Amino acid sequence: MTDSFTTVRERMVQEQLRSRGVSDPNVLKVMSEVPRHLFVDDAMQARAYGDHPLPIASDQTISQPFIVAAMTQALQLKGTEKVLEIGTGSGYQAAVLSRLCEQVYTVERINTLLAGARKVFDQLHFYNILSRLDDGTMGWQEHAPYDAIIVTAGSPEIPQPLIDQLADPGRMVIPVGDRNVQELQYVTKKDGEIEVQRLESVRFVNLIGEHGWKND
């Protein structure tokens, strides 16, 4: 996509992503194309491609570009997958995923965020994203199983419904820890067995719900 931020996006890819080990060519291509600035308030657009998270409505955040790219790369998408995202937020992560898989199912508990994200999805004609207002820690049973699951909020543990809804084989990326700092965990299911690999320390907003934190 060509717009006034095209050069800035290319610089973001080179300086923030490639330099830190993001090497999947498809992920890098999509990150250079999806207009991140449309997923933040107008006053924040000049900062949209900086190496940092940004505030969005309802005291939530849009993750820094590197975290979005690293989590996406960890899912090892080939283009044919059904992906479940927990925590739509601004919609940016879902937009990136939608260019790399067959279908994205995204769940958000805050209506104003979901409405804003849907508006941008429609503006960009990203029609392979289905969204739902609900408790994300319960997943989205109707469309399970999912080849990949990505959780964009920190949880005290891996919600059991998400493990149950993960395909076999399947993979999940989720931040797990306390309310202030988490470990990004790469979860795989194969032959009924769950394995967890710890990737790096991160800091996300809290995952609120029946199988997450009980309140803000």
Image (cartoon, rainbow, N blue to C red):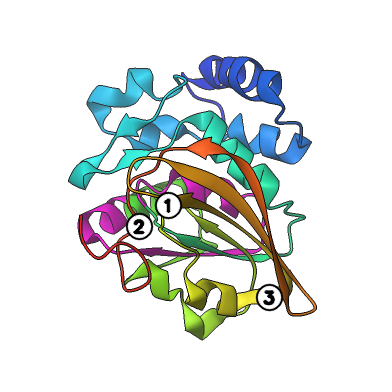
Q: CA distance from mark 2 to mark 3?
A: 22 Å
Task: Kindly tell me whether residue 132 is visible in this rendering.
Answer: no
The answer to which of 68 and 197 lies nearer the viewer is: 197
Which residue position holds label 1?
121
Which segment did they paint magenta? 89-116
The answer to which of 50 and 9 lies nearer the viewer is: 50
The answer to which of 124 and 55 lies nearer the viewer is: 55
Residue positioned most to the bottom? 142
- The magenta stretch spans residue 101: yes
* Image: 19 above or below 197: above
What amino acid type should be assigned to the residue bearing mark 3?
Ala
**Secondary-structure class at tag 2:** loop
Q: Residue at position x 66%, y 17% from top?
A: 14
Could you tell me which quadrant the C terminus lies in?
bottom left
Which residue position holds label 3?
167
Q: What is the total number of numbered labels drawn onto the structure image?
A: 3
- The magenta stretch spans residue 109: yes
Task: Kindly tell me whether residue 110 is visible in this rendering.
Answer: yes
What amino acid type should be assigned to the residue bearing mark 1?
Phe
Closer mark to the observer between disc 1 and disc 3: 3
Q: Which picture quadrant has residue 25? A: top right
Q: Earlier in the sequence, mark 2 or mark 3?
A: 3
Q: CA distance from mark 1 to mark 3?
A: 26 Å
**Secondary-structure class at tag 1:** helix
Q: Which mark is residue 207?
A: 2
54 left or right, relative to 149 = left
Closer mark to the observer between disc 2 and disc 3: 2
Q: Which picture quadrant has residue 81? A: bottom right
